[in-house]
Structure formats: C-alpha cells, structure tokens
Amino acid sequence: MNKNIERPNFFASARNTFKEEINSLSSLSKTLDKNKFNEICNEIIKCKGNLVLMGIGKSGNIAAKVSSTLSSTGSPSFYLSAAEASHGDLGSLKKRDLLVVLSFSGETEEVLKIFNSCKNKVNKIISITGNKNSTIAREADHHLLVDIKKEACPLNLAPTTSSTAMLLVGDAIAIALLEAKKFTKEDFALNHPGGKLGKSLLKVKDLMIKKSSSPIVHEKSKLKEVIYEISMKGLGLTLIENNKNKVCGIFTDGDLRRALNLDLDIKKVEIKEIMTKKYCFIDQDSSVKNAVLKMEKNKIYALVVKNNKKEITGILRMHDVIEAKII
C-alpha cells in the first residue's frame, strides 16, 4: 500500500457543510415573510378538520417529521405521501381538512398530478416551497417562501440546506402553535407516555395503584389474616382501616419481619397493636420524580397517596416506578 497517497480530509468537508448551511439558515428569519407565516399559523389554529402534511422524496421525509412534531406538541396531524395519495389514499382527505404541501421546487410531478383533486377535497391548501413562481406556490391558497439560494452540496444538487430549512420552518410553526395554545409539560407527557422525557413528567396518580385495588384490612384483624391479605394482593403492604372506614395505619413486609422476631401469636395479636401509625404519603398530583425522591430520602419503597382533600386514593410503589422505566 502506498503510504504517500493523500487521504481525503472528511472533517474539513464536514466543517464546510456546517458553515454553508448555518450561513444560509441564519438569514432565514430575515427573508421569511412574517405576514404569510402568521396567516399559515392562524389557518392551522382555525382548522376544524384534520391537519394533513404532504410531500414526496426528501420533502416527504421532512413533511413526515414536521407532522410528528406538530402532533406531539398539541396540533394533531398526519402525513400523506403524494405517491400513495394518487393510488387511493386521497380518500383520507375530508372537506374540513387543511392540507400543507412541502415541495422545494414547487413543481413536484407527483403532487401536481393530484393537486386539483386535493383542492376539491379539502378546505384549503398551504404550500411551502423555495420558488414563489412555481405552480404549487401559485395554486395554493396560502404560500410561504423558503428562500435558499444554494445547497451545501458542492454540485448544488443534493437537497441539503433546502431540506434543513424546510425542517426549521416546520419546527418554527409547531413551536409558534405550541406557545399560542399554551401547551404545557403535562400535555407533552400525555402525548409521550413511552418516552423517558414524558415519563419523567407523569404524576403520581398516573402510576399509583388505586385504593379500590389495594389490600385493606380492619384494625382488629388478626396478624394471620393480614399476612394472607398481603400475600394475596402481592403489593408488600396493606392499608388498615378503623370502624369509620378511615385509614389509620399501614403494615408492610418490613413490619411483618420485625413482628415475627417478637415471637407473636399470629392467630391472636390484632394488627392495630403492631401497625405503623405514622406513615409517609404524597399528593396524587405530585410528579413521580418527587415521589421517588421522597422514598429515597425516607429509605422506603412505597408511599400512601392522598388527594387535595387529604383522602387516601391509592398506593405508589418504587416497583411500579421501576417497571414503568422512569428510573
């Protein structure tokens, strides 16, 4: 092997790509028509039907991603491929829908073939292109120009800066709508129950075992009966109620081990004599994260859950938090 052969400097090329794209994108906020941007956001806010994003190729990939971002941030949306639409999927469009078409050239053949059909099926069409004089730009009800003069590709052919710019505009629309709708962290969590970020925002009531499903015994129950109840429900503890159906204590696996060391008669001793009267609890609207911190601080593995009226509504265990893969 000839050691004198000069190897390509891949990172130097990468740095040049970064520079080209960043320079182009930095001017986007200046060239974007703010009035048309506001018009588009208002149309989406007013939409009574579905918000549908369409594209094909690279623009289709961007449209699908923007649609996903919109859905997760409070503006429900779905993606429709222009190619699939011409083979039957146009049936998913309805009269009250708002269609957003992404095409940098504005002359995408697959979109043009079905454009008139789309106009007849939906309420309005919004186009986002890089050519204000293109057919798609002219025929749409609203058009937003993404003015990119040059691709980062040295051949000025491969969609690079243009696709990044389209994505940036889509993200900007999604975030503008999020803020207008006052979308919260709690809303985000409801849309992301499977993601780590969403799970970290879950509330205690979302994971707790409800009181109706929790083990409960009367304070005069014998220890043997309590052991049976704990074993049957498999939660490692039980709530204990008095004659007024109020929880007056709890009894855990740890309490049981300590009780057995005292050589008690499990057929005779009443649970009120050995139960834990002072127990830790947490509000059902607290975050699961705060519940975990409280359990760690007190070196316990379960918390009694109460509502704002101080009524017991359930039990949260560390086991359930781990099983949900929050920690």
Image: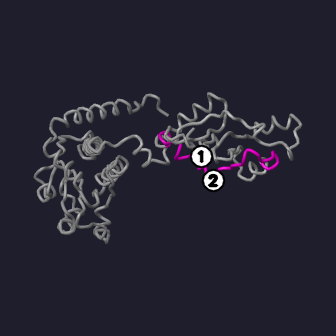
The quarter of the picture where the C terminus appears is: top right
> How far apart in space, not on screen, are marks 1 and 2 (Cα)?
8 Å
Badge count: 2
Q: Is residue 208 magenta?
A: yes
- Could you tell whether 124 is left or right of 68 in the image? left
Q: Is residue 44 above or below residue 309?
A: below
For the residue pair 310 and 191, the one nearer the viewer reads as 310
Provide the secondary structure element on which disc 1 rests: strand
**How far across and down, in percent of the image, does residue 231 sit?**
76, 50
Res. 47 image quadrant: bottom left
Q: Quadrant of residue 253?
A: top right
Q: Residue 213's mark?
A: 2
Instruction: Tell which of 236 and 16 is nearer to you.
Output: 236
Dot label at residue 220: none
x, y percent for residue 208:
57, 46
Asked if 213 appears above or below 255 in the picture, the reply is below
Mark 2 belongs to which amino acid?
Ser
Q: Which residue is mark 1?
A: 314
Q: Is residue 205 left or right of residue 28?
A: right
Amino acid type, callout 1: Gly
State the extent of the magenta-drawn residues as a range.
Answer: 199-225
